[in-house]
Amino acid sequence: MIKFTDVSKCYANGTEALKDINLEIKDGEFVFIVGASGAGKSTLMKLILREEKPTSGEVEVNGYNLNRLKRRKIPKFRRTLGVVFQDFRLIPTMTVFDNVAFALRVTNVSNRIIRRRVPYVLGLVGLSSKARNYPTQLSGGEQQRVSLARALVNNPSLIIADEPTGNIDPEMSLEIMELLNEINKYGTTVVVVTHEHDLVTKFNQRVLVLKEGEVDSDELDWRP
Amino acid sequence: MKGSSFTYLIKEGAKNIWNNRLMSFASVGVMVACLLIVGAAMLFSINVNSFVGYVESQNEVVVFLDDDVTDQEIEDLRAQLGDNDNLSGITFVSKEEALLKEMENMGDAAALFDGLFKDNPLPDKFVVQLKNLEYINDTVRDIEHLKGVESTQAPRNVADMLVNIRYAVSFAGSFIILILAVVTLIIIANTIKLTVFSRRTEINIMKYVGATDSFIRLPFIAEGIILGLISAIVSFFILWGAYNWLMSWLIANPQSWLQSAYGSFVPFTQMAWPLFGGFALGGSLIGVLGSFVFVRKHLRV
C-alpha cells in the first residue's frame, strides 16, 4: 500500500518537483503513472523508494512511515518491494541465475531456498533455459525479464517499475506489461511509471497523470 | 549474519578480484611499488645506523692515570668506571704492559727500551669503550674528575661527526619514509576509489534489493585485505632478492669501498619478520581503510 498525504518535494536548487500530492494505492491494485518529463514521476519514485525524503507531508509505503524510517532500517523496508529499472541494472559479471539469486543472498536466504526459488521465478518470466547465460548474451526484453525476476524473487507485496519498456522494442514491451499484469493477478500491487500512452490504453487500468508536480487526473478509463 | 552468507561474501570478494583483474593488478602494482620504496628506504636507514654503530663501537677513550697512583686507587677507579652507565669494556693496561707493547712494535730496536723498565715513563691507563658517543663530552668530564686520573685522550671530533651522521640519517630516513607512506596512502586510496567507482552500479543495485551497509562493505574489505596481503608478499620477496643480490655483488667486488663496511651490514633474515609483519599489516590496513572510506560514499542511496 502506498499513501501520500500533502506531499511536497523541493530540491536544494529550488526546483519544486511535487506540489501537495495526495494519493492512495491500495494492496492488489495496478496503477500506471504517466506524465511528460519533468512532471515529477522520478521524484515520486524516489520518495516511494525512500531515496529522497519529502520536504513536507507524509509518505507511507507497505506499512512503513518513510518520514520516520531510520537509515538503518531502510534495507529492511526495501526488501518488502521489488524494483524494475529502465536500464535493467543487471550485474554483467554474474549469470542470470546469480543476478536473481543476488537479491536473496543479500537478505541472508540459505542456499537451499535459493536453489528452489530462483528457478521457479525464472520459469515465471520464461527464462528457465537462459539461467547460465550472462546478461550481455540476452536481448533487451530478456534482460528486463531477468530484472523482473530479480524484483519478484523475494516475494514482495509491491512491484515498482520505472519505465520498464523504455529500452526495449515494442513487441517486447507488450510482453513485459502483460507479465506485470499477470503478476498483479496473483495479488501483488504493481506501479508502473511510463510515458508510452498506447501501452497504457491497452490495459484499461487505473491511470494517474502527473502534470507539473501535481496530480492532473486519476481515473480508470483514461485516454490521452 | 549467518555463516553461509559470510563465506559467500568472502568468496565474493575473492571473485571480484579475478573479475576486475585489471583493476586488481593495478592496485597490487601500485601497492608493491610503494611498499618497495618504503621498504628500501627502511633497509637503507637500518644499515646506515648499523654501520655508524659499528664505527662507534671501534672508538676508545684512553684514561691516563697519575704517576704515583697506588694499587688501591686503581681498584677504586676500576669500580668507579664500572659504575658509569655510559661505559663498557673497561680494560686496565699497566705501565709494564704498555712498554712491552711498544717494544713489540719496535721489533729489532726493542733492545733500546730495555733500560726503561726501571724508570718507566709510560703511565698506567684504562682503555674504555663508550656505549653512546653522543654523551662523550659529559662522560669524559666525569672521568677526569675522578681521583687518580691524570688526563684523557678521546676522539671527540670523530664522535661529533658520527653522532651528526646518525642524527641526519635517522631524521632524513624517517622523514622520507613518512612522506612515502603518505604518498602511498594517497595513491592506493585513489586506486580503491576507482575500483569502487567502477562497481557503483553493483553497489547501487545492492541498495535497492535491500542489502545492509555491512553486507555491501564486506566483499570490498575482504578484497582490500587480500590485495594488501598479496602486495606485501610480492614486495617482501622482491626486496629480499634485491638485498641479497646487492650483498653478493659487494662481496664479488673487492675494490668497492663499501666492502670495508661489509661486516656491519644487517643480514636480511634478521629484518625479515618485522619487515614482513609491517608490510602485511600496512597492506591490509590500507586495503581495509580504503574500502571502508570509499564504499561509504556510494552507500548513501
Image (tube, rainbow, N blue to C red):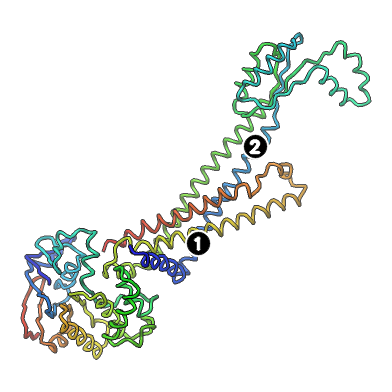
Residue at position x 57%, y 35% from top?
B167
Image vertical order of residue A121 relative to residue B272, above or below: below
Q: Nearer the viewer, residue A38 or B91?
A: B91
Image quadrant where residue A209 sits: bottom left
Q: Position of residue B62 (x, y in %)?
A: 72, 22
- Considering every residue shown, the one lying at the far top of the view is B68
| Badge 2 density bin: few <14, some 14–19, many ≥20, Cα 10 Å | some
Quadrant (top left/top right/bottom left/bottom right) for the C terminus of chain A: bottom left
| Badge 1 density bin: few <14, some 14–19, many ≥20, Cα 10 Å | many
Circle 1 is placed at which residue position? B28
Q: Position of residue B135 (x, y in %)?
A: 60, 25
Chain containing mark 2: B
Taking the image as shown, residue B230 lies to the left or right of residue B59, namely: left
Which structural element holds mark 1?
helix
Kind of residue sitting beneath label 2: Val
Circle 2 is placed at which residue position? B52
- Quote the CA–CA distance across marks 1 and 2: 35 Å
Residue at position x 56%, y 57% from top?
B235
Residue at position x 31%, y 68% from top?
A108
- Considering every residue shown, the one lying at the far front of the view is A112
Q: Nearer the viewer, residue A149 or A48?
A: A149
The answer as to whether the residues below labels 1 and 2 share one chain is yes
Kind of residue sitting beneath label 1: Val
